[in-house]
Image (spheres, helix red, strand yellow):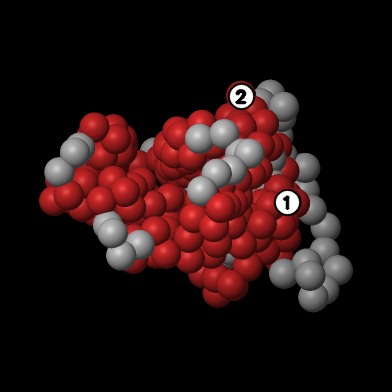
Amino acid sequence: MEFRDAILLLHPAIAVLVVFPLIGIVVNRALQTRQRRLETKATGKSKIPPVAGQEHVQLGRWLTGTVVGIVLLALANDIFGNILDTQLWTKARFQVIFIVLLFTATIGSIVLLYKAKERNWRAIFATLTGIGLVVLGSQDGIYRKTDQWYISHYYYGITAASLMIFSLAILPEIYKDRSNFWRKVHIILNCIALLIFMGQGITGTQSLLEVPLSWQEHYIQQLYEHKCDTKPCTIQAPNLP
């Protein structure tokens, strides 16, 4: 396995080791927080400790950062892999510089979103982060499966990251709003996000089967060029050093 293949496997490894366990804990704390709120409203007390709500908020913030980070990692692997393969630096140097600056701006925006207190600034940095992910995702080299967007790991990932970013941006509003409007929005959007994460587990496994390792790319390219799925053909082995 080459170094590039090891970098490719970082994305699913982090998802399995960090993201999905975090999702389970966050969902558990969310259910505890809601149960405590309902019990307190009905009887004035609850056996669930108050710390459940604080843990839900803190772990939710970690989850957002992890999801955005893992999406950026996947995008960087595909984009810079394509830059190296096509030698884009020699052909379109400005485009490469723009991509690097866009990665920097997106990372800076999510960091500033965590620090922002005022509503307007949170809206600005959340929007900039989302735009950064979408623009980076439109670059060459990204495995998108646009013709099958409904089972695309890329589109699921961008949607899940966008929902996490929005949830982080509205977090202070949940505790300020007496009408519970933002709390209901938060619950609905994160229920949708949970379903998308479940889809991510399925489409991610599918992508591992569809995206070839570096030593396999030569053979896959010949399959497409010779249309070996519709007629018999011979695949030539590459010249190995």
Q: Residue at x 30, y 65 (%)?
A: 179
User: Residue 69: image x %, image y %?
Assistant: 45, 36
- The answer to whether 234 is drawn above or below residue 171 in the figure is below
Mark 2 neighbour class, 10 Å CA radius: few under 14, some 14 to 19, many 20 or more = few
Q: What label does residue 205 carry, if any?
A: 1
Helix, strand or loop at disc 2?
helix
Nearer to us in this view, 232 or 93: 93
Q: Residue at x 69, y 52 (%)?
A: 201
User: Residue 51: image x %, image y %?
Assistant: 51, 31
User: Residue 233: image x %, image y %?
Assistant: 82, 64
| Amino acid on which the number 1 mark rests in the picture | Thr
Mark 1 neighbour class, 10 Å CA radius: few under 14, some 14 to 19, many 20 or more = few
Side (left or right) of 142 relative to 93: right
Q: Quadrant of the N terminus?
A: top right
Nearer to us in this view, 172 or 195: 172
Q: Residue furthest right?
A: 232
Residue placed under numbered mark 2 in the picture = 3
Helix, strand or loop at disc 1?
helix
